Structure formats: C-alpha cells, structure tokens
Image (tube, rainbow, N blue to C red):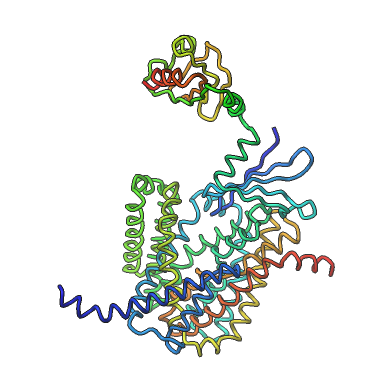
Amino acid sequence: MTEVTETQLPGVGVRHEFTTVSGERVAVLSHRTGRREIAVYDRADPDACSTVLHLSNDDTRTLAELLGGSPVSEAVSGVQQLKGVAVDWIRIRPGNQHAGATIGDGRFRTRTGASIVALVRGDETLPAPGPEVALEAEDVVVAVGTTGGLRQLRDLLEA
Amino acid sequence: MTPVLAAASGEAALAFIEIGAVALVLSVLARLAGRLGITAIPLYLLAGLAVGEGGIAPLDVSADFIQLAGEIGVLLLLLTLGLEYSPDELRHGLRSSLTPGAVDALANFTPAFLVGLILGWEPAAALLLGGVCWISSSGVVSKVLTDLDRLGNRETPAVLNLLVIEDLAMAVYLPVVGALIVGSGAADTAATVAIALGAVTLILAVALRWGDHLSRLLAPASDEALLLAVFGLTLLVGGLAQEVQVSAAIGAFLVGLALSGSVQARAAAVVGPLRDLFAATFFLFFSFSVDPSDLVAVLLPAAALALLGIFGKILSGWVAARTATARTPGRLRAGTVLIARGEFSVVIAALGATTADGAELGALTAAYVLITAIAGPLAAKYSDRLATRVATAT
C-alpha cells in the first residue's frame, strides 16, 4: 500500500497526501463539514496545487463507489444487475441467539434460501465467509437472496 | 398593558424602520464584499461611519438598541473564535508553532506599540494598538485560503497553526490589557491582572482537561436547547467576568475554548447565524462612535502602520512556511495571506474605547483594518507573480 501522510488543518479539517506510482503528488482534504477536495500538486511548485476538485458529500460517495474500494461493493454491484435477486444489509442485534454461533450452525441458506456473501465487522470486511465463521453481535451481514428469503433472514437475525 | 404598548409603539415603529433599513444596507454590503472576494468588515465599518455622529445619515432612536446588540455581538464573536479550534489543535499548534508565533508577535506587536508611544499615548493605549496590529483576521485568512484553493498547499498548515497560536496568545493578552485599562493604582492593577490571569489559567486548564465533561453535559440537547444553553452560558460567564473586572469578551472567548468535541461543531453551527447578525451590528456600532473627521486625521499614521503591518506579516508567514519546508513562492503566499486584520483588532480597540486615547485608537483601528483587510486578500491573490518577480530580480 502507498504511504499516506496525515496533516491536521486547524479549524478546517484534515489532509491526507500520497505520491502516485507515476510520481504525481495527490492530497485529499476532508473538511469538518464533510465536504472533500482532491488536490494535485504542481510539478513546478511542489508546495502549491495545480488542480483542485471540490466534492460534496454525494459526489464523494459516487466517486468512492466508482473507484471501487471494497470487494463488497463490487460483488453487490454485480448481483444488482440480476432480476429477482435482492441484497440486504442486516445488523445482528446484541442478545440474538445466533450471535456467537457459526454461520453453519444457523442453517440460514436451508431455512431462508438467502446466502451470506460478506460480513462487515467494525471497519473490517470479511468477504465470502465460510460456514465455520462465527457471527458476533453488531456484525453487519450482507446477504443475497429473494425478497421473501431476506425478510425471513432479517427476522432471524434481528430477533 | 395596552397603554404601555400604545405609547411605545410610535417610537418602536421608528426604531424598526431604522434597524430594518440598516440591516438591508448591511446585506447589500455583504453581497458586494462576497463579489469582490474581501471580508465585509471594512464595508460595515464604512456604513457605521455613515450612520454615526457626524455621518451622512445619523441614526436617531435605535442607537441604544444597536449599542446593546453590538455588545452581544462582541461576546458571540469571541465565543465563535474560541470555538474555532479543538483542544487537540491548540495543543498541537502550541508545540509546532512556538517559534513562528514568537516572530509573529515581535514583528507585528512591537512596532505598533512603539508607534503608539511615539504618538504620545498612554502605555495602556499603546499596548492596545500593538494588539490591534498583531492579530490576523482568522475569518479573512481561512476565507482567502479556501477561495484561492490553497488548503492543499504545503505552507497552509503552518499558516493555520500560526492563527491557532495567535488565538491562544489572545487568551492571555486580552485579560491582561483589560485589567490594565480598568486598574487605577499600581497595586490595584496588579491585583486585577492577577485575578484575570488566574481566571484564564483556570478556565484554560479546565477546558483542555475536562472540557469533554461540559460538552457531554450539553451533547444530548436539541439544536434549540443547545443554542439557548450556549447563548446563556456566554452571556452569563461574560457578565460574571465583567463583574470581577475581567472583560466580558474574554469570558465569552473562554466559554468557546471550553466547549469541545461534537458539541463544539454543533454549537458553532447553531450560533453562526446569530453571530453574523450581532457581529455585523458590532462592527457598525464600533465605527458609529468614530468621528469621520478623526479618521482623516489618522490617515497618515494608519498608512504607516499598515505598511509596517504588511511587512511584519510577510516576515511571520515567511518564517512559519520555512519551518514547514516550503520554498520562496510558498513563503510569500503564507506571508501575504496573513496581512488582513479584522474582527480581533476591532474587538481589542473597542476594549479601549473609554480610555483617554480611545477616540484616536478607534479611528486609527478603523482605518488600519480598512487598509489591511482590502490589501491582504489582493496581495495574497497576486503573491505568485510577486514571487516570480523576486526570483528574476535575484
């Protein structure tokens, strides 16, 4: 991974900088308000920016989606093209009977027809978890199935 | 009830008309300033001259209201200045920018203080003049940096950290000069200075260590409840500070410093519009009490001070940007962007309004802020051209 340096901008927000493989220096500025700026540094004057792109909250989300960060979003954008197939994000309630048990124990696919394609735990994403993976409270389950099957799965995990 | 309302309504109607007309004029000025890419403060000051005594359209019945609203404006202005930085940013700024901060103080405060003494002012008034010329307008600086797309630049963190240091320096400077102005004898003055510094140290320590407790207390409030709580706290602490001879403005500033975390951001957002309204009134009221003929008289010293102030800031920006490893163009950009003085300068001058040299200080400050707030953004805009010229000349 490229080395990223972080600089605090008092009263404004925070700035992350890195150098691309081709030697271009790029900064992402995160304003406190959520607005972002992408700046490309000038080769002649490396202290200044030659191009600055202003992004609203929505723009940032769109751009992040297009740049395709996580495997989850790529997998999801793939299945959303299919007719009759739905995707849902389900947070496991603390105290749910499946929290602490493995995916295999829950026999979710047998019972609902829906498949768990990923788990999001805090900042971490576990793509394609096997049946031996244990679910934890507050995990977000990403599941693919029919609308009815997903509703059943939601009933099981949010109980 | 009815007779009271009926008797007051004639005067109230006149006051509404005056205040409404003034607010509309300020609105036009704010738009004009936005178009020109400068802060509206100098234009508000000009408007205040026009409606003040000796101006072209002096206000009649609403003067009292404008005075009180202006005083609330100072409190809200300083509250939001205190809110601007989180305790972490203050600590980091203090660690990283002490040397540039010291250069900034020496290069800008000292010459102006000496000019005050040369003009034959009392030392306390000269100290105020030093402060007026010392502090850059953080409002103008961050606006110019945003407008010119310079937030990504290497010198920018150094510039912003310098503003943090100035903000912190104000937390010590304001109470000290505030006490010096009210203190009559030497022992008396020493006592008020001690009380003021003690209060500031206490509040700063509480804010930096336990500010999150106060913030947590306020966090569950709705926006409406938060606005009222912050407004109330500001006026209450300001009033109490005034009671112990520390200026109310400083109390408000410390309330801002004490709020941190998510409450800080929310408070800044809810108080913002209120601050804009009352602060505009404050700038108006400030030059309201300046006699236009005084302004003409101080033009020469104001121009000389502005020249000193421009070079002083270029020096402090240069030093700050050099520690951030920026090269010549970056150093010049840092210096020129810092030239503009604004809200803090006017607040400092307003502290000394009651002193013997108050009238002259007020006029001088108005002229000084007018010159630097207009020249600063322009110089910042063209600093790269200046840098090329410097480079070809050497």
**Residue B41 horizontal/vertical position (percent):** 52, 72
B141 sits left or right of B275 in the view: right
Q: Quadrant of the C terminus of chain A?
A: top left
Q: Is B39 placed above or below A124 here?
A: below
Give whichever of B209, A21 is nearer the camera: A21
Q: Image quarter for residue B370? A: bottom right
A80 sits left or right of B287 in the view: right
B207 sits left or right of B309 in the view: left
The residue located at (65%, 36%) in the rendering is A67
**Residue B132 horizontal/vertical position (percent):** 53, 73
Q: Is A71 placed above or below B277 here?
A: above
Give whichever of A53, B217 is nearer the camera: A53
Q: Quadrant of the N terminus of chain A?
A: top right
Give whichever of A5, B18 is nearer the camera: B18
Q: Is B361 placed above or below A86 here?
A: below
**Residue B222 horizontal/vertical position (percent):** 34, 48
